[in-house]
Image (cartoon, grey):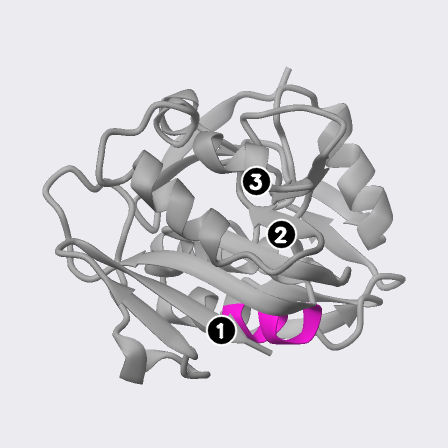
Amino acid sequence: MARSIKYPIMKMSIEIHSEILPYMRWHEAVQECSRLGDGWRLPTIEELNGIFNDIKPGDFGCWSATVWEHDDSMVWSKGFNNGNAYLNPKTNLNRVLAVKNQTADKDYWSSDLPFPLAPTEEDVQTYQNNLLPGTVLLLGCTKRLIPLSDRQLDLDPWHRSDTVIVGDWTGNRHFYTNIILDGGLCFTKALCDRIIEMASRNCHRFITRSFSHRLDIMRVADYFPGVNDLPIKPARQIRYPEYNFFIWDF
């Protein structure tokens, strides 16, 4: 049985499967990762970028889980010979590097984060008070926000139910009246910009709580945007000492 190795990516710990799967089409790659069991999946393009920066697994291209926001028949891939990220039709052939979240990080991101990483009841009320009438998509599975949402979208959700959609946040193609996200803009600028761009096409209102600076208890956060850092300026901002609520109307 193929073993796995543990490697930190973007201060998040993932496991990289020791067996690099052969060339196959994208839908086949998704199925093959699932057949490995126990949470194995395709990496995001950000995770592949991190893998390339720290290790060189070989001279080949690999599929990512990140679907191009302009055409869902195209997927981002990573060339490990030169480090280029490129778009690839799902019908093309690429190799497969399966990954999964480490158990410790999955526990960390699950249900009981300490304040201010987890929203307070007042924060939950802020989300609720600013929702427009209609449907709500939650990016991630923040425990206190699940009751506010109709659907939850996450690549590797700790919460499992009929309402959970497994997938990349930026890959959402369905329209919801509201999209909400708690703390998720703080990974990297590139991911932050892509989330906002996705929301601008797929909702009327986007609400997120975003940290304004690094906190000692943080394990995963590299980017702390202010209003002027955002690719689309929000309609409103609600300030707290440690974080801000940003609210967009599209």
**Left or right of 117 in this view: 4:** right
Viewer-side residue, 143 vs 219: 143
Magenta includes 200? yes
| Crowding near the residue tagged with mark 2, few <14, some 14–19, many ≥20 C-alpha atoms within 10 Å | some
- Tell me which amino acid carries mark 2: Asp
Q: Position of residue 232 (x, y in %)?
A: 46, 83
Q: Position of residue 161 (x, y in %)?
A: 70, 24
Per the model, the C-alpha gap separating discs 2 and 3 is: 20 Å
Check whether the beta carbons of the residues at disc 2 and disc 1 lie within 8 A of each other: no
Q: Is residue 236 above or below residue 163?
A: below
- Tell me which amino acid carries mark 3: Leu
Residue range (magenta): 196-202
Q: Position of residue 34 (x, y in %)?
A: 74, 30
Viewer-side residue, 239 vs 35: 239
| Crowding near the residue tagged with mark 1, few <14, some 14–19, many ≥20 C-alpha atoms within 10 Å | many
Residue 155 has which mark?
none
Identify the residue shown where x is 65% and y is 50%. Answer: 136
Q: Is residue 61 visible?
A: no
Under circle 1, the secondary element is strand
Under circle 3, the secondary element is helix
The residue beneath circle 2 is: 168
The earlier-in-sequence mark between 2 and 3 is 3
Q: Is residue 65 above or below residue 230?
A: above
The earlier-in-sequence mark between 2 and 1 is 2
Per the model, the C-alpha gap separating discs 2 and 1 is: 21 Å
Check whether the beta carbons of the residues at disc 3 and disc 1 lie within 8 A of each other: no
The residue beneath circle 3 is: 148
| Crowding near the residue tagged with mark 3, few <14, some 14–19, many ≥20 C-alpha atoms within 10 Å | some
